[in-house]
Amino acid sequence: MNKIRATVWNEFRQEKSEEKVQKVYPDGIHNAIAEFLDKHQDISVKTATLDEAEHGLTEQVLDETDVLIWWGHLAHREVDDAIVDRVQQCVLAGMGLIVLHSGHESKIFRRLMGTSCSLRWREAEERERLWNVAPGHEITRGIGDYIKLSCAEMYGERFDIPEPDKQIFISWFQGGEVFRSGCVWERGNGRIFYFRPGHESYPIFKDKNIQKVIVNAVRWAAPRIMQDTKGCPNVKEPIEKIGGI
C-alpha cells in the first residue's frame, strides 16, 4: 500500500515564547497534528517549521509531499515569497493543501484564493457548533450533524473568499455570528481545504472529531494526478495530418 505522504507546517513561534500556548501544545501544534495522523496506517507524516532552512519546504521535501497542512498565525509576512511560489506550483501540479484556522491570512492561501481572505474575529472562549452541511462528502465521513466545541475563538462573516466549489461546514457561535468554516476548491490539479477550527491556546486539535475531519481531508486532498503546469509547450508535431503536411 502506498501511503499518503503528509507534511505539517507550522510557524512554531508561540509554543516557544508563550506559556499559555506551551501548556496546550508543549511540542508544537505541528507535532500534535502529526501525532494523530501518524496513527493511521495509510498516512506517513513529517513536519516543517518557519525557522528551518527554506522554512523546511525544500524542493526535496515538497517532491515527497502529497498533502501539505498549513498552520500560520503571527509571522505570515516572514514566509519568503520564493517558497510561496514553490508551494503554489506544487498545488497547481496536484499536491493537496489543507489550511487551518489563522492560516487564512497566509501568503499561500491568499495567493491561491486571489482575495484578501479577511474576516471578523473575537476571542471570548465561546461555544461553537460546527454544522455539517455536506454529510455525503469524503471530508465529513463519520461526522454527525454537527461538532460542538465548548471553547472557541469566533470567526465571523464576511469571509472574503471566492465562492467555494463545495461548502462543507458552517459555524454558529454563542455570540450570534456564523462563518463558512469548511470550504473546498480546486486550483490546477490540486485540491484545497480550508478548515476554521483551531487556536494556539485552546486544545481544539485534541478533539477527536476535529482530528477525524483532518484525517479525512488528508485522504480527500491526496493527488489524483501530478503534472507540471509551468510554461506553455510548443507542440510542433500535430497528431493528425494538417493540410499538405
Image (spheres, grey):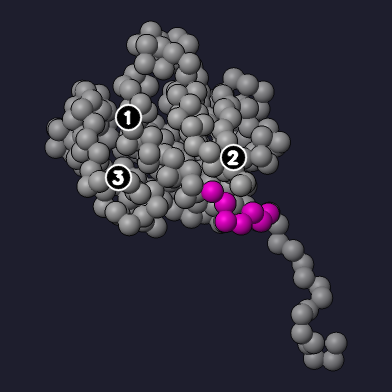
The tag earlier along the polypeptide, 2 or 1, is 2
Q: Residues within 10 Å of mark 1 (few under 14, many from 20)?
A: few
- 35 lies above or below 164: above
Quadrant the C terminus occupies: bottom right
Q: Residues within 10 Å of mark 2 (few under 14, many from 20)?
A: some
Specify the amino acid type for callout 1.
Asp
Whether label 2 touches label 1, CB < 8 Å: no
Whether label 3 touches label 2, CB < 8 Å: no
Read off the residue under disc 3.
143
- 144 lies above or below 39: below
Q: What is the magenta range? A: 222-229
Magenta stretch: includes residue 228: yes
Residue drawn at (66%, 27%) of the image: 54
Residue drawn at (59%, 20%) of the image: 51
Task: State the CA–CA distance, disc 3 to disc 2.
Answer: 24 Å
Read off the residue under disc 1.
207
Q: Is residue 159 left or right of residue 6?
A: left
Residue 164 in picture, x, y percent from top left? 37, 54
